[in-house]
Image: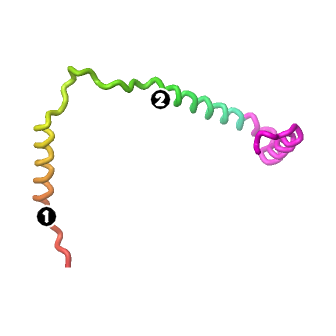
Amino acid sequence: MFGSFGWMELVLILVIVLIIFGAGKIPQLGEGLGKAIKGFKKSVNEVDAIDVTPPPSDAPEAQPTQIAQAAQQTAATVEAAPQIKQG
């Protein structure tokens, strides 16, 4: 549908853009579009460069007992909070 633009359609689009934005704004629009495309390509390449390998096995990890203690402390804090009475 969009791939069948002929030269007449492209000229018509160019004339409409010139009428709407004026000749002075066209370079600014092109510059902004170029920066946007450049930033998009840069962000896509940075995502590919991120290291997604797991950390080395010698890195200290949280022990299950530490996690359980943290959960108990959180539960105790919630229980100690004043209760709101409804009604």
Residue 32 in the image: above or below residue 78: above
Quarter of the picture containing the C terminus is bottom left
Residue hosting label 1: 82
In this figure, which colouring scheme has been used for the structure? rainbow
Seen at 66% across and 31% down, the residue is: 34
Q: Single out the residue that lies furthest toward the front.
A: 1
Magenta stretch: includes residue 16? yes
Decide which of tag 2 and tag 1 comes sooner along the chain. Answer: 2
Taking the image as shown, residue 63 lies to the left or right of residue 51, namely left
Q: Residues within 10 Å of mark 2 (few under 14, many from 20)?
A: few
Determine which quarter of the picture holds residue 80: bottom left
Kind of element beneath mark 2: helix
Seen at 57% across and 32% down, the residue is: 40
Taking the image as shown, residue 21 lies to the left or right of residue 40, namely right
Quarter of the picture containing the N terminus is top right
Q: Residues within 10 Å of mark 1 (few under 14, many from 20)?
A: few
Magenta stretch: includes residue 17? yes
Seen at 85% across and 43% down, the residue is: 9
Residue 35 in the image: above or below residue 21: above
Residue 67 in the image: above or below residue 41: below
Residue 84, x across and y down, in percent: 17, 69
Q: Single out the residue that lies furthest toward the right.
A: 8
Which portion, as a residue range, is magenta? 1-27
Q: Residue 47 carries which label?
A: 2
Residue 86, x across and y down, in percent: 20, 75
Residue 63 in the image: above or below residue 49: below
Mark 2 or 1: in front is: 2
Q: Which amino acid does label 1 sit on?
A: Pro
Q: How far apart are marks 2 and 1 (CA)?
A: 46 Å
**What secondary structure predominates along the stretch shown in magenta?**
helix
